[in-house]
Amino acid sequence: MPPEPWTKGRDVFDGVADIYDARRPGFPWVVFEEIAAITGLGRGSPVVEIGAGTGLATIRLAELGTTLVAVEPGPALGELLSRRLAVFPDVTIVRSRFEDWEPPKSGFDAVVAASSWHWLDPTTRWTKAHDVLNPSGWLVLLGHIVVADPDEPEVYAETADLHEAHASGHPSWGHPPTAQEVIAAAEAVSSSIADVERVIGRAPGPSETDLFQSPILRWYRQVQHFDAHGYVEHLRTTSVYGSLAAEVREPLLSAVEQRIRDRMDNNATRRYLISARLAQRRR
């Protein structure tokens, strides 16, 4: 099966903005405390965030006191973002794709992308991020990676037969890795942020490795607990399920919800490894 285009699923999120805001995991404060300690970001630091969504990471950047430009193309996502960030006077929301955005001539101390880097045009993302940064600025990439605990029942393991029955051979089906496997894979290529993105960030394409220094990698654990309905709502906010045809998606999700009720006592756990990849711009 040929690889799917990098744009597939990119426009799902705006159609489920309210559920996205309610069901997607945010970022613990400690993640941004450490980012600030590494990069020097703080009050007044100019920052641009790419694909801010409903502001799950944006709120943390605002709480650091940064002077923030949040770039978000989705109208519904942008409306929720505006409401969440209304109390922060130093946040400007721009309704645009990053590729189409015209940055100011003054540079930024950081470009931040939380679960959005892989949705950018692979032919231009590295160069544009580099060009909008100040000479010593930082590229900060964040994401939640679903991981499995070998000692705990995992939803995909309990529903793999349903996934195959409703959408056989889908390239995204598969058992989650363990946290240790993700970290080992990233550390093995950690001399290049582009290589790390190819391994764990779903971001193939030109590397542009001469634009950024070797990355600093940080890892954090997070967990969400759902009942069956909440878990299925969460799946609706992901590009994998959101981009399925409705006649495939709806029976599959109904079957998954029933399986969680029947076999997992109506309890579903979603474990994440939060990855933070920070690379300083080469002068």
Image (cartoon, helix red, strand yellow):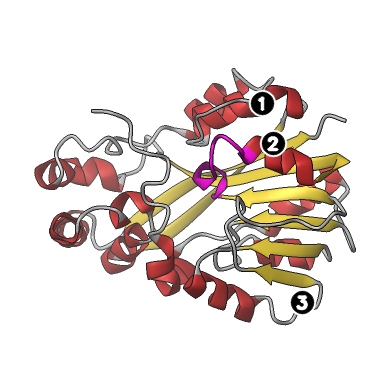
Q: Label 2 near label 3: C-beta < 8 Å?
A: no
Q: Is mark 3 on a helix, strand or loop?
A: loop
- Disc 3 to disc 2, how far (Cα)? 30 Å
Please tell me the numbered disc located at residue 208: 1
Relative to residue 22, is residue 142 drawn left or right?
right
Amino acid type shown at disc 1: Glu
Q: Which residue is drawn at 59% across and 17% down?
A: 188
Q: Do the residues labelled 1 and 2 touch (CB within 8 Å)?
A: yes
**Around disc 2, counting alpha carbons within 10 Å, would you say few (fewer than 14), some (14 to 19), or many (20 or more)?**
some
> Is residue 205 covered in magenta?
no
Q: Which of marks 3 and 2 is nearer the N terminus?
A: 3
Question: Quick one: label 3 or label 1, which is nearer the N terminus?
Answer: 3
Q: Magenta segment: does it hold 122?
A: yes
Q: Give the range drawn in magenta.
A: 115-125
| Residue 39 visible (yes or no) | yes
**Residue under pointer 3:** 88
Q: In this view, does 160 lie to the left or right of 187?
A: left
Instruction: Name the kind of residue labelled 3 in the image.
Output: Phe
Residue 222 picture location, percent across and down: 54, 51
Residue denoted by label 2: 127
10 Å crowding of disc 1: few (<14), some (14-19), many (20+): some
Question: Within 10 Å of the Cα at label 3, are there few (<14), some (14-19), or many (20+) other Cα atoms?
Answer: some
- 65 versus 175 height, above or below: below
Residue 39: give x, y in percent of width and height.
Answer: 84, 44
